[in-house]
Image (cartoon, grey):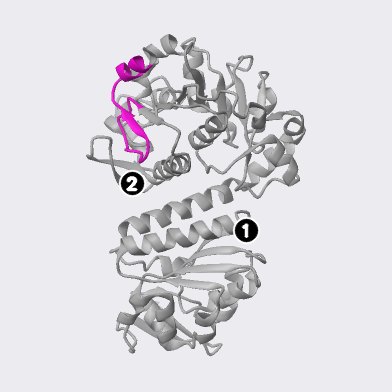
Amino acid sequence: MELLKKHSPSSKNLTETIPSSIKVQITPSGENTVRLNNILIHSMYDPVKEGRSFSKKVTNGSQVCLYGFGLGYHIESLLEKIGPDGFILAIELNADLLNAAMILRNQSKLLLDKRIHIVYGLNEAIVATEITKYMEKMQSTNTKNFQVIFHSPSFKCIPSSFPKLTNSLEVLLMERRFPAVLGDIEKENYILNKEIVSQSSGINCNHSKHKDKPVLLVSAGPSLDDIIPYLKMVNKKFILACVDTAFPILSREGIDTDYVFSLDPQEDSFQYFQDHLDSSTTLIFTPSANTKVVHSYKGKKFVVYKKTSSQFTEEKSVINAKGSTQSGGSVSCLALDVLIQFGCDPIFLTGQDLSFPSSRTYSSFSNNNKQMLDKLDSAYSLKGSHKSDSIRQKTVNVKNIVGDNVVTNQAMYSYIRGIEEIAAVNPKIKIYNLCSHGAKINKVIPLGSVNELIKFLA
């Protein structure tokens, strides 16, 4: 217990007795395992072997953010795998489980190892600050080998007194699963796109090209309905960019865009381009974007690499020469980061609601909305269809631009975080969210009316 206090002063509140919520069981291999509230934390047969299996994908030099100390079997194995240059940030917020780990197994060697830091505490804000500090340090040390891993049984036991942190960790888990689910598709696209990628110019060709020029970045959220009538009027005075879902909307309305962004590896994304393959708009795509989009689009193309992707085999010099982004899974985040690299300032986001205003997910002009209309019958409303689409993921309560509580889902919550991170590292760039009916985005200034945009033009 004394050694644990060097990691977390809050551990002084832990007791020297095994909590009543912990049920100890000796396994056939002679090691202890436990159940906490009937959740089995480690294998009933051989927890050491299970720990080795848990860490098998971790490589030498990895910077690992781990939720779940458990009894420490998997951590011992992780320390072997990361080697002398690796580091583990181990988060465990369940006092009973951490207590049992200290009593049932000798953790001295692990606690003295300088390659691990254990986060435990009772105050959510203090714990979150500590995690953020360590994660930023780890990511700056080695972005390529940074990994987020969850010990699932331990994560199921996270206390209810950490609601915001639980949600943030769940979003991290979702973000890590997303590339795993789509990994094979991305890999296939990357192979098929390789020739076009090598022949295409990179975003660095336009680095600072639009310095101090205003840009409108259009997404396909419900608030796009409010701005559509004005876009023809303003698009001559702005750089006009859009995400793939908004591209057919603007094209059908006769609104010319300068850039369209695409990173979705799935074939569904081709629907946004299929009627506009001869457009003069420049396509900015990632190497793992849907190959049908990349091969069929006849307009000018720029490629952008995602620094966080493990798919790319190109030399670092090639990636640096063409240009890259740190942004995550959202095409809006990708677009925002690239436009900042182009020198655009200020940046006006529109159609960026990131919640469900009036129980709607998309603009009424969007392909997604039209697909919902096609599926409707007399017993099923359009509002019901949007609602069904919106609740497929776990919902999260956030504040809207006027301070009221609104509901979003974990994917969109992740996108909010992504935009906030980009805004935070580019504090000199003015970023506005125009006519949003949805979630508040920190460090992004809300503009409630299109009149504000017209004033800017004047």
The answer to whether residue 168 is seen in the rendering is yes
Compared with residue 412, is residue 280 higher up or lower down, i.e. above or below?
Answer: above
Name the residue tied to disc 2. 395
The stretch of residues the image draws in magenta is 434-456
Q: Nearer the viewer, residue 395 or 415?
A: 415
Q: Position of residue 458 (x, y in %)?
A: 36, 12
Q: Quadrant of the N terminus?
A: bottom left
Compared with residue 228, is residue 432 higher up or lower down, i.e. above or below?
Answer: below
Is the residue marked by circle 2 packed among few (<14), some (14-19), or many (20+) residues within 10 Å? some
Q: Earlier in the sequence, mark 1 or mark 2?
A: 1
Residue 438 shown in magenta: yes
Q: Position of residue 95 (x, y in %)?
A: 34, 76
Using residue 368 as the reference point, say whether residue 15 is left or right of it. Answer: left
- The type of residue carrying mark 1 is Asn
Eye-nearest disc, 1 or 2: 1
Q: Position of residue 192 (x, y in %)?
A: 73, 36
Q: Position of residue 432 (x, y in %)?
A: 38, 29
Q: Nearer the viewer, residue 214 or 377?
A: 214
Badge 1 element: loop
Using residue 74 as the reference point, say whether residue 162 is left or right of it. Answer: left
Query: Residue at horizontal 57%, vertical 48%?
Result: 179
Residue 156, picture quadrant: bottom left
Compared with residue 253, is residue 437 higher up or lower down, i.e. above or below?
Answer: below
